[in-house]
Image (tube, helix red, strand yellow):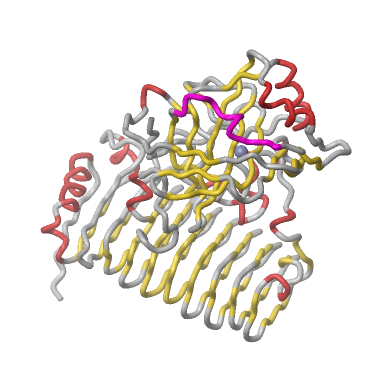
Amino acid sequence: MSKRRAVVGPGCSAVRSAIEKLEDRSLLAGNVLVQLGNTASVKGDGLDNAIEISLGSTPDEVVFRGLNGTTVNGSANPFVATVAGGLGSLNVNLGSGNDLVVVTNLSEATDSWPVASDPQNADDLVVGGDLSITSGKGDDVVLLRHVEIAGALKVNTGSEKDIIVAESVTAGSVSISTGSGNDQVLGRVLSVTGTASISTGSGADAVGVYNSNLHDKNRLSLGGDNDAAWIESNVVQDISLSGGSGSNELTEDFAGHNTVSGAAKVSKVDEHLELTAAVHFGYEDEIGPDFWGELTPAFLLSEVGRQQAPINIVTADLIDVTLPDIDVTYVPNTNVAFVHNGHTVQVNLPAGNSIEVDGDTYDLLQFHFHTTSENLVDGQGFPLEFHLVHRDAAGNLLVLGVFIEEGAENAAFDELIANLPNNTGTPSTVIPGPFNPEDLLPVDRDYYAYNGSLTTPPASERVSFAIFQTPIELSAAQIAAITTAIGGHNARPVQPVNDRQIFV
Ligand SMILES: [Zn+2]
């Protein structure tokens, strides 16, 4: 097969020209090599925040090479390659410097709202061959989401602190190896037909594998120093787990929290980790929002996710569209459970309360409160915000958000406030009812819409947010009662919007 290559060196116009060529599908019959220079040549070109490359459905090979010094932190512009349609294979070679690679499906980047009804398959990026990412020095972040790889997924990172997240990824085989430095690897909702191998080098590394299906012989080997591995809720065939030198920890009761059909061999593991579900997070100090991503690999998305909630809604930047109506069918409920779960006060609803959005029915599971509000509007917060959490039959989450401002007393909240639980002795109560949650909503149902995440760990993404534009009013005493019951500040700070669109 002949290989046609467009080689582009560093320099502003050359980079732009390379992207134009990539968008010209006539070039994509063969293989394309894009060779970028250092960060300055990319950032200086006015290519704010992201470079997006979309490929058609023909099998192609794309190589990104030489991203020296591309930085992730602060206001620097990460390099984001968004690839859609069928690919032959994808190779990304990163140079030194702190690099960010995001490989995901295009629909996620274009932000339809609410999110697609099939979270697993419908719009995955398909790679016909291998997907290989190799990086040099620097703190690199590799984020793979909703990708189906017919061949092998190979990730090989160099020295320093690297983070690798593979979520909703199907692959023929998986091989992830990290170099020195304190690395973190998260595999979540993986399906691997062949072997899966994760090996970490020296440094205190953390590895998490959850909700995954590993069909063949699997190996996890941790390198030197004190490493930790959370392996929970997976279906595995044979598995071999080996800690290196140092004091290594593994999920407590490994066999009890995974389904192992073959042999499980565990060696050089000294201690046991508490299950992820028991990992304690909070809003202050070393368990506060800035550190959630470090508490366990299961929480990594709170650190490296690209569609995190809450956000600051900037009204000047909103995309004005005709959003679907939210048809609320909540009913009067009796003997409703009201609990303090350690983070907030939460009303758990029985079946029978639902909304319909865009032809899809979502059941109301629970609602809970944040003080102060988590989402902001033009930088302004509210004393309280409550979130009504819904789920459809496919498992998609949709959260309705309601801002609460101080004003007139609101009788619809009387029974709820009379039965508030707390974290100082009364962790659960019952609202006798009949209690209809619809009475708590504003009359005007216009809303802001965006794709976000859970605002508490594990900060899972693909959560559709609809925030009512009109706040409701509660009296100062009513607000104080709810705030006191919560027992302290429980609002996650706003997160970067990145390349998302916010609709109105
Ligand atoms: Zn919430």
User: Which of 79 and 96 lies nearest the eye of the viewer?
Assistant: 79
Q: Which quadrant does ligand 1 occupy? A: top right
Q: Position of residue 418 (x, y in %)?
A: 79, 29
Who's the residue at 54% across and 63% down the image? 187
What is the span of residues highlighted in magenta in the rendered image?
Answer: 434-445
**Where, by quadrant of the figure, is residue 219 drawn?**
bottom right
Quadrant into which the C terminus falls: top left
Q: Nearer the viewer, residue 368 or 178?
A: 368
Characterize the magenta stretch by its predominant secondary structure. loop
Residue ID at (24%, 46%): 10
Task: Give the x, y percent position of residue 183.
Answer: 58, 57
Judge whether residue 441 is colored magenta: yes
- Vertical arrangement, residue 217 with respect to residue 285, above or below: below
Report whether 420 appears left or right of 136. right
In the rendered image, the vertical position of residue 141 relative to residue 423, given as above or below: below
| Closer-to-camera residue (203/227) | 227
